[in-house]
Amino acid sequence: MKVHGKPTRTLWLEPDGQAVGIIDQTRLPHAFVTARLTTLDEAAHAIRAMQVRGAPLIGATAAYGVWLALRADASDAALARALAVLGDTRPTAINLHWALDEMRRLLAPLAVSERVAAAQRRAAELCDEDVAINRALGGHGLKLLEAAWERKGKRGRLEVLTHCNAGWLATVDWGTALSPVYLAHDAGLPVHVWVDETRPRNQGASLTAWELGQHGVPHTVIADNVGGHLMQHGRVDLCIVGTDRTTAHGDVANKIGTYLKALAARDNGVPFYVALPSPTIDWSLRDGVKEIPIEQRDGTEVSDITGRLSSGDIATVRVTPQGSPTANYGFDVTPARLVTALITERGVCAASEEGLRSLFPERARRHA
Ligand SMILES: CSC[C@@H](O)[C@@H](O)C(=O)COP(=O)(O)O
């Protein structure tokens, strides 16, 4: 997608071929700052500190992190250490482990002398594949948006609600939930997005609002608790969110608060779609509530909030009383029964074992 009119990805090989470039997402929306990653530790830190975040982008960064590690030492022990360090950065998004498995399968059998070049090639391929997958799923999602617009009698605006950031900043490009939105906007549909702020880290207010604004998509940021009210008053035509891990039966883990939006959508007859690239499917899991590991982060993300002062300075302030304990669950699970459909690069399917199997028979069989 474009930043200040210039086509930009979230992750790239630097022109000198010696580092990986990223957009430091902790600085958005107030500053567009890029950073160079040159070592395994810098890549692991970027994921842990959420300079890069979003399930597909975490996976892509980890793949390049393996390359950075092998440049220093391509031995078996160094490869094992890189996979362990990167695998330990964030627990919920399965794309991280998927990408590391891809790298391990390719690199472990190779001679040490061949590993660095092969790792760089594969990391670049994974990035390109992510872009192609997200563009394809956007095309399938677009049809759902067009159908909703028809159903609405093409009156007013097509009102979409999204939670967290599942846009191009969460992927290498295009995004998952927002890929259909960009395509709809470009096709001339009068789409308007309700953007949940997404406390505690405000990925909606900071990132989704920023990237929609860069592309010129009309949007309104709302506090996290507003969605139910809007749905009761017919102000939301459909919800689309992303997912960090989808079970073989169609349960989806996504940013904390997604489940409550799905409940409100069900109560109000609003379609609730989940967009996902297939590497987000964890074919080994069945029951998302019981089995998906939910990240818990530092409580200061709840007690404190960072923003821009009228002076232009960035400041962090506490919003809770001194000493009040906090709990910071990063994700929740929306059971398949609340999901209207899954949007993937191979098409749209029911959020169920049968639905996923119909689109990905070869992968479902491998894990049967
Ligand atoms: C393509 S995005 C799907 C999810 O990764 C996204 O919705 C999300 O929850 C991101 O969480 P984050 O904690 O910002 O990495």
Image (tube, helix red, strand yellow):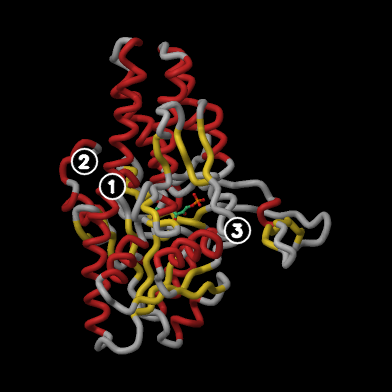
Query: Which amino acid, mark 1?
Result: Ser
Nearer-the-camera pick, 332 or 187: 187
Residue 30: numbered disc: 3
Q: Residue beneath label 2, please?
A: 363
Q: Residue 69 at what x, y percent from top left?
A: 46, 22
Marks 2 and 1 close (CB-CB < 8 Å): yes
Q: Which residue is mark 1?
A: 278
Vertical comparison of 325 with 83: above or below: below
CA distance separating discs 3 and 1: 33 Å
Q: Is residue 303 visible?
A: no
Task: Give the residue displayed 75% in from the left and 54% down from the top.
Answer: 325
- In the rendered structure, which disc, 3 or 1, sits on the residue that comes first in sequence? 3
State the separation of the CA atoms marked 2 and 3.
Answer: 42 Å
Crowding near the residue tagged with mark 2, few <14, some 14–19, many ≥20 C-alpha atoms within 10 Å:
some
How far across and down, in percent of the image, does residue 1 sit? 36, 56
Q: Sequence order check: which comes first, mark 2 or mark 3?
A: 3
**Vertical order, 126 against 121 (above or below):** below
